[in-house]
Image (cartoon, grey):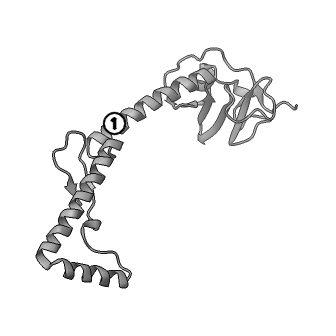
């Protein structure tokens, strides 16, 4: 298999340099700074930056030495350098597979905590709360139907339901009401 163009030797350890901004996500770290600052960190040699002789003008992707052409875009050590403004560059470095898994697991924990907090503040109900809401909604529908029968009589309610079916419109009983539970421990459902 053919090797990739623009290969480099990734640094074993990066050095922190004042003035370089760092953002981390589950797949890669993004470094923003001048070429001198990024070179001082050990990200890439100065000759490999965009705009240098023999390199593209705006952006370049550097691959770890020995990377085959069909090895994928998320290869650990892959470095994408791009010019963001005059004298400022962004370097996106793909982290190791182990670090990716660690970060994904940490993000999954943070997402579960956010989901639990959202459910607790009138957000998405749990499966038990949804089942309880369905049962409450059915109970409300029966109460509305019973009240209509008490007020109008069974024959009148049946005639109106039949008329609505003929017009192919849904009956306007409590079916349009939606029961919403406000988190665990809610005393009464709220109707919308």
Seen from this angle, which residue lies furthest right? 1
Residue 171 on image: x %, y %: 30, 75
The quadrant of the rendering that contains the C terminus is bottom left
Left or right: 63 in relation to 41: right
Residue 8 image-quadrant placement: top right
> Callout 1: 10 Å neighbours few (<14), some, many (20+)?
some
Seen from this angle, which residue lies furthest left? 151
Residue 91 on image: x %, y %: 61, 32
Residue 138 on image: x %, y %: 27, 58
Residue 61 image-quadrant placement: top right
Residue 74 on image: x %, y %: 67, 33
Camera sees residue 103: yes
32 or 140: which is nearer to us?
Answer: 140
Q: Is residue 50 above or below residue 44?
A: below
Q: Is residue 105 above or below residue 119?
A: above
The quadrant of the rendering that contains the N terminus is top right
Look at 36% across and 32% down and name the residue there: 113
Camera sees residue 96: no
Instruction: Determine the secondary structure under disc 1.
Output: helix
Look at 16% across and 73% down and name the residue there: 148
Look at 19% across and 43% down and name the residue there: 186
Q: Is residue 130 above or below residue 151?
A: above
Q: Which residue position holds label 1? A: 116
Residue 140 image-quadrant placement: bottom left
85 or 14: which is nearer to us?
Answer: 14
Left or right: 152 in relation to 108: left
């Amino acid at each position: 298999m053919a090797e990739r163009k623009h290969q480099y030797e990734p640094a074993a350890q990066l050095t922190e340099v004042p003035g370089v901004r760092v953002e981390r996500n589950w797949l890669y770290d993004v470094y923003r700074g001048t070429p001198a600052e990024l070179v001082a960190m050990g990200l890439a040699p100065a000759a490999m930056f965009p705009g240098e002789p023999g390199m593209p003008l705006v952006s370049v992707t550097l691959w770890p030495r020995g990377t085959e052409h069909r090895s994928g875009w998320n290869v650990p050590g892959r470095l994408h350098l791009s010019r963001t403004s005059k004298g400022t560059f962004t370097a996106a470095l793909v982290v190791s597979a182990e670090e990716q898994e660690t970060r994904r697991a940490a993000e999954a924990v943070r997402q579960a905590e956010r989901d639990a907090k959202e459910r607790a503040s009138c957000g998405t109900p749990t499966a038990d709360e949804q089942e309880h809401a369905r049962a409450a909604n059915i109970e409300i529908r029966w109460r509305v139907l019973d009240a209509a029968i008490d007020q109008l009589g069974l024959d009148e309610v049946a005639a109106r339901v039949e008329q609505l079916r003929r017009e192919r419109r849904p009956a306007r009983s409590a079916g349009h009401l939606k029961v919403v539970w406000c988190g665990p421990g809610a005393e009464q459902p709220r109707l919308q």
